[in-house]
Image (cartoon, helix red, strand yellow):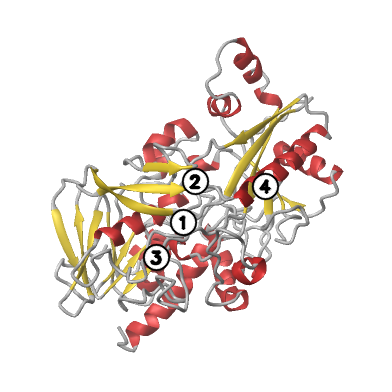
């Protein structure tokens, strides 16, 4: 395994080892470019993983203090992971491409009141080759002649109900989970609860894909339990290195030729805002004042049906099915944006908290006794960018690293409530069409897991933070690599798009380095 000196200013420093950071790092290392990756969490092995949501929650969840304001959970506004592999440890594997119209939100939807919509600085066709690469790299089922996974009972219930309502675009989902052995990893064993980490490594996760591949090149060093606290500039206002705290709280500075930040939206924003200088008193790359603004997540709700027969929703792949009929973005339902319906399981204890928060006694226990009859789905809707939805730093409160605690402010746009009301109505009809005895609506109970938009790409430095390659407008050797780049979010899970953007960024950056343009 390679090691690099702290004073080695020729290395690329990548912050974060999740979908974006590890993909950029591996892609560069494969080209013999030296990379140091700083990861705030520790490295787990497959032996550390348990097929148990509750047990793994405390093992890899980012539990450092965050403050939620507005329409979000006050003490736990977002859910991401603090571990090697980042949130690819927790994700479901769902890998759907954004659609062309979703990358043109401003052009598609026009002037929606109280929004700050924007088009992407390139179109779908330009990103398509990297979507192809990402799908093949990750092993996405239903693409590149890779077989779909089988449908479990939860999927069969959703499919049957959806067809009764006239839906036709229904399948067992495009997921980055091997349906057969591939790339040295086994096929899915249908163990269920994929968000606990995949015990057999069938699910694409950078812990056991991108990271070991990069290490094998001899051009990559992973430093775990190293929390980046500041990106430093030289006298020419170019990035010169990254200050970080190691596991013992000791401060170090790794010199760098280029820095790529892929810390997931909250930590990427915090690092930029906390890295102030005379030229950038409001944070690095923030001459536009847009760092932290336009925070987006997906409109999210769920439904649980108590079915007349046994379902055993926990058996099989987590998101084992999807209905995509209504993601066209031009629904004649009085709202803007598309909707996805996806299967989902929950453990009995989590299910109890979701369907009857605060309840106890016979009413609750009688419901949980029907757990084997539960069917459940999630609803994803397209969020609308708003300037007022943003991530800032608390003026006085500090965490264990001495960093200002992030404040995540999110207020639901009226369009989001219209999506939820409509989609929950459809979900209820799906289950009731099959004889469901009761249907529970799950609303305002989930922390955000899809976080995007706080360093958006664009062509105008006055209204965006980065250019089309994630290179910041203000500093040419500082890049943002994660979902912070999204100008719009569509209704699809973001990881596939993040990986495609990371591959595209790595190609561009490698060319810039080769030509000594940076």
Residue 84 on image: x %, y %: 36, 51
The residue that label 2 is drawn on is: 448
The quarter of the rendered structure image containing the C terminus is: bottom left
- The residue where tag 4 is placed is 418
Mark 2 → mark 4, Cα distance in angstroms: 19 Å
> Taking 66 as reference, is 443 left or right?
right
Q: Secondary structure at mark 3?
A: loop
Sequence-earlier tag: 3 or 4? 3
User: Can you tell which quarter of the image residue 222 is in?
Assistant: bottom left
| Badge number at residue 295 | 1
**Residues under labels 1 and 4: Cα distance?**
20 Å
Nearer the observer, 116 or 435: 116
In the displayed structure, 146 sits above or below 69; it is below
Give the labeled residue for mark 3: 290
Q: Residue, x 24% and y 62% (percent of image)? A: 275
The reply to whether callout 1 and callout 3 are in contact (CB within 8 Å) is: no
Disc with the residue nearer the chain's start (3 vs 2): 3
Nearest to viewer (mark 2 / mark 4): 4
The disc, 1 or 4, on the residue closer to the chain's N-terminal end is 1
Disc with the residue nearer the chain's start (2 vs 4):
4
Residue 260, image x, y percentages: 34, 68
168 vs 402, nearest the viewer: 402
Quadrant hosting residue 146: bottom right
Residue plotted at (19% across, 47% down): 402
User: Is 236 placed left or right of 502 in the picture?
Assistant: left
In the image, taking residue 254 as reference, residue 344 lies left or right, namely: right
């Amino acid at each position: 395994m390679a090691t690099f000196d702290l004073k080695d200013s020729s290395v690329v420093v990548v912050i974060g080892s999740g979908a974006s950071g590890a993909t950029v790092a591996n892609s560069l290392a494969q080209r013999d470019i030296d990379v140091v990756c700083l990861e705030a969490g520790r490295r787990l092995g497959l032996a550390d993983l348990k097929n148990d949501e509750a047990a793994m929650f405390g093992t890899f969840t980012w539990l450092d203090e965050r403050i939620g304001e507005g329409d979000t959970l006050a003490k736990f506004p977002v859910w991401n992971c603090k571990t090697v592999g980042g949130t690819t440890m927790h994700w479901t594997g769902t890998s759907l491409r954004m659609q062309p119209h979703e990358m043109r939100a401003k052009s598609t939807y026009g002037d929606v009141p109280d929004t700050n919509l924007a088009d992407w600085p390139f179109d779908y066709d330009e990103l398509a080759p990297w979507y192809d690469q990402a799908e093949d790299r990750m092993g996405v089922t239903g693409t590149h002649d890779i077989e779909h996974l089988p449908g479990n009972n939860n999927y069969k219930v959703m499919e049957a109900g959806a067809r009764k309502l006239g839906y036709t675009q229904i399948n067992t989902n495009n997921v980055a989970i091997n349906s057969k052995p591939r790339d040295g990893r086994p096929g899915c064993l249908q163990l269920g609860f994929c968000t606990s980490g995949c015990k057999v490594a069938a699910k694409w996760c950078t812990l056991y894909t991108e990271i070991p591949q990069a290490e094998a090149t001899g051009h990559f060093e992973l430093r775990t339990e190293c929390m980046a606290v500041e990106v430093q500039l030289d006298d020419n206002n170019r990035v010169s290195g990254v200050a970080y705290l190691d596991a013992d709280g000791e401060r170090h500075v790794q010199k760098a030729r280029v820095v790529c930040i892929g810390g997931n939206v909250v930590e990427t924003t915090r690092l930029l805002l906390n890295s102030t200088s005379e030229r950038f008193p409001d944070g690095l790359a923030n001459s536009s004042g847009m760092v932290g603004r336009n925070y987006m997540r997906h409109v999210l709700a769920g439904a649980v049906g108590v079915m007349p027969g046994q379902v055993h929703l926990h058996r099989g792949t987590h998101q084992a099915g999807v209905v995509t009929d209504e993601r066209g973005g031009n629904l004649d339902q009085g709202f803007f944006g598309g909707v996805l319906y996806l299967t989902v399981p929950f453990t009995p204890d989590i299910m109890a908290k979701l369907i009857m928060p605060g309840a106890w006694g016979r009413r609750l226990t009688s419901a949980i006794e029907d757990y084997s009859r539960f069917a459940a789905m999630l609803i994803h809707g397209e969020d609308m960018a708003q300037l007022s939805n943003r991530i800032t730093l608390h003026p006085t409160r500090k965490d264990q690293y001495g960093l200002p605690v992030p404040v995540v402010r999110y207020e639901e746009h009226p369009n989001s409530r219209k999506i939820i009301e409509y989609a929950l109505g459809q979900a209820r009809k799906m289950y009731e069409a099959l004889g469901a005895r009761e249907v529970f609506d799950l609303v305002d109970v989930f922390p955000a897991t899809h976080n995007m938009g706080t360093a958006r790409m664009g062509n105008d430095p006055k209204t965006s933070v980065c250019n089309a390659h994630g290179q910041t407008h203000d500093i040419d050797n500082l890049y943002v690599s994660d979902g912070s780049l999204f100008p719009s979010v569509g209704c699809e899970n973001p990881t596939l798009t993040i990986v495609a953007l990371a591959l595209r960024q790595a190609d561009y950056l490698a060319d810039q380095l080769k030509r000594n343009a940076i």
